[in-house]
Image: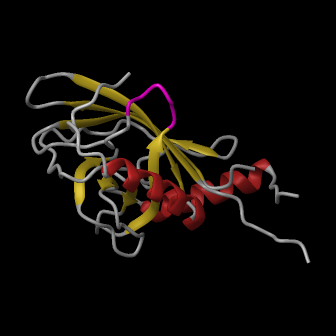
């Protein structure tokens, strides 16, 4: 029996964050995957990034 | 072999979802631990253009493009990184919910995308695709 999987939904967005403290504008392109499997994969990566205790301020493109 | 759909079917699927979002829709960002049934703490809330399709235009080639999105000029913020985004109805019911990550490797996401209280969060472009093929 073949392993059938549904296709994924996707959200693409470009966001800008203007930092209150510095006035600096950071731009990010985000991709959202609307499946539990891919969300879990991305969630694991994101939580690993959160474990880094260095300065939360970071530069954007 | 992947399941594929006609363009008409893809458009119908995308439009059906955006119609579910409806008028007064909001784009919200959340920290980790969020689900479509129970979104986690909201980091920022951006009102979508209020139309019957959740702030989106009609789907073309399976993808709906959002109209103008109002910035959150005083974000709630959170020490936790942004991990999820949701498109919610005016009654704060999540219709689309997804984990988010940077699509470009040259963006430094080592510490995660953290939004501080009082930051302004804007969204200049947003597209939604229900069926990518």
Residue pictured at 55% horizontal, 67% vertical: A36
Residue pictured at 40% horizontal, 70% vertical: B35
* Number of marks present in the image shown: 0
Residue pictured at 37% horizontal, 47% vertical: A49
Q: Main secondary structure of the magenta part?
A: loop
- Res. A1 in view: yes
Residue pictured at 11% horizontal, 24% vertical: A22
Q: Position of residue A61 (x, y in %)?
A: 38, 21
Using residue B114 as the reference point, say whether residue B95 is left or right of it. right
Q: Residue B107 colored magenta?
A: yes
Rendered image quadrant of residue B38:
bottom left
- Res. B84 in view: no
| Nearest the eye: A54 or A35 | A54
Q: Residue A28 colored magenta?
A: no
Q: Position of residue A38 (x, y in %)?
A: 58, 58
| Nearest the eye: B1 or B25 | B1
| Nearest the eye: B113 or B126 | B113
Q: Position of residue A42 (x, y in %)?
A: 50, 54
Using residue B7 as the reference point, say whether residue B95 is left or right of it. left
Q: Is residue B59 above or below residue A9?
A: above
Rendered image quadrant of residue B52:
bottom left
In magenta, the rendered stretch is: B103-108
Using residue A60 as the reference point, say whether residue A11 is left or right of it. right
Q: Residue furthest right?
A: A1
Q: Position of residue B90 (x, y in %)?
A: 30, 63
| Nearest the eye: A21 or B7 | A21
Q: Is residue A17 above or below residue B40?
A: above
The quadrant the N terminus of chain B occupies is bottom right
């Amino acid at each position: 029996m073949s392993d059938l999987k549904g296709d994924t939904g996707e959200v693409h967005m470009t966001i800008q964050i203007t930092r209150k403290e510095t006035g600096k504008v950071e731009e990010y392109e985000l991709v959202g995957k609307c499946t539990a499997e891919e969300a879990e994969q991305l969630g694991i990566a994101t939580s690993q990034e959160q474990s880094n205790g260095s300065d939360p301020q970071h530069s954007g493109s | 072999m992947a399941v594929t759909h006609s363009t008409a079917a893809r458009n119908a699927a995308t439009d059906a979802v955006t119609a579910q979002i409806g008028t007064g829709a909001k784009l919200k960002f959340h920290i980790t631990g969020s689900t479509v049934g129970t979104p986690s703490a909201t980091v920022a809330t951006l009102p979508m253009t209020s139309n019957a399709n959740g702030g989106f235009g009609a789907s073309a080639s399976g993808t709906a493009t959002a109209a103008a999105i109002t910035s959150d000029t005083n974000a709630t913020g959170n020490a936790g990184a942004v991990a999820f985004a949701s498109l919610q109805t005016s009654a704060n019911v999540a219709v689309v919910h997804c984990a988010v990550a940077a699509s470009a490797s040259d963006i430094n996401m080592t510490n995660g995308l953290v939004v501080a209280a009082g930051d302004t969060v804007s969204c200049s472009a947003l597209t939604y695709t229900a069926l990518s093929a």
